[in-house]
Amino acid sequence: MENKEYSNKQIPPVARFLFLTRWLQLPLYLGLVLAQCVYVFHFWVDLSDLISAVMGNQTALQHILDIVTIEGTTRPTKLTETAIMLVVLGLIDVVMISNLLIMVIIGGYETFVSRMNLQGHPDQPEWLSHVNASVLKVKLATAIIGISSIHLLKTFINASAYDEKTLIAQTGIHMAFLFSAIAIAYCDRIITQTSQQSGEH
């Protein structure tokens, strides 16, 4: 009933036009879907090479060794535990970036373009039921911290290949991401409390 009453309202032409411009974001989200496809392809290439290298495929082994070798360091001659760990961390990194893309695509479309009407769908993401711009920012900041943590761990595993300034710089960048996420979450909490207090009055 409420939606029917709203549909009967006369929307000024300028307001209608400006509201329709939100669909200009649709190609951006479709572009991110293509980027997701690239990451899926990259994931399976690295995973298949890792499995083939373990099975003794020399071409796949050379590709894996190329991935884990840092410029200026000695190239490993065989698949070591450290090399496997670095490749697996790279795969986890791809998965986390893919999760970030999904949050941006689905959450952004739902928040800024149009409702998906997924209420009651068994596969609806739990976070999508209460998503808004503030929640999306907090979740994105948390995801970025996770990605940064993976990169920092990969750096620490190869700490001998980096100088002290690089290690300190990467740690500082990670801490900056962490404090930024805390600040965003704190601001969101203040806004939520203020809104609740305004509603009570």
Image (spheres, helix red, strand yellow):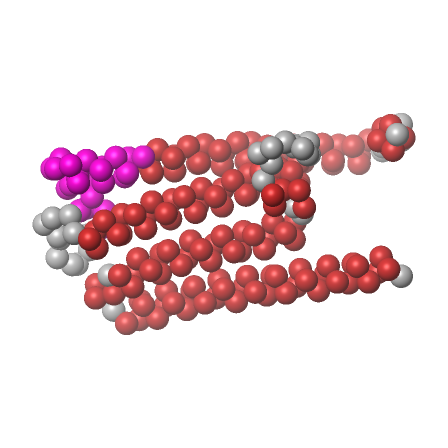
Where's the N terminus, which quadrant?
Answer: top right
Q: Position of residue 10 (x, y in %)?
A: 89, 30
Asked if one can make out residue 10 in the rendered structure from this viewpoint, the answer is no
Is residue 19 visible in the rendered image? The answer is: yes
Measuring from the top left, give residue 179's x and y in whole percent: 52, 67
4 left or right of 26 in image: right
Give above or below for 91 relative to 182: above
Residue that protrudes farthest toward the front in the picture: 122
- The residue positioned 61% from the left and 61% from the top of the image is 185
* Residue 145, x across and y down, in percent: 47, 58
Question: Where residue 99 sits: x, y (%)?
Answer: 48, 43
Q: How many marks?
A: 0
Is most of the magenta stretch helix, strand or loop? helix
Q: Where is the C terminus found, in terms of image quarters? A: bottom right
Q: Is residue 158 left or right of residue 125?
A: left
**Which residue corresponds to the image point at 78% horizontal and 32% vertical from the top-left?**
16
Q: Is residue 163 magenta?
A: no
Q: Nearer the viewer, residue 136 or 22?
A: 136
Q: Residue at x 45, y 67 (%)?
A: 175
Question: Which quadrant holds residue 62?
Answer: top left
Residue at 35 percent of width and 61 percent of height: 152
- Quarter where residue 184 is shown: bottom right
Q: Quick one: which residue is furthest to the left in this view?
A: 77
Dividing the picture into quarters, in which one does residue 171 lie? Answer: bottom left
Look at the image and say whether residue 51 sits in the magenta stretch. Answer: yes
Give the magenta range. Answer: 44-68
Q: Say whether residue 67 is left or right of residue 193.
A: left
Left or right: where 91 falls relative to 122: left
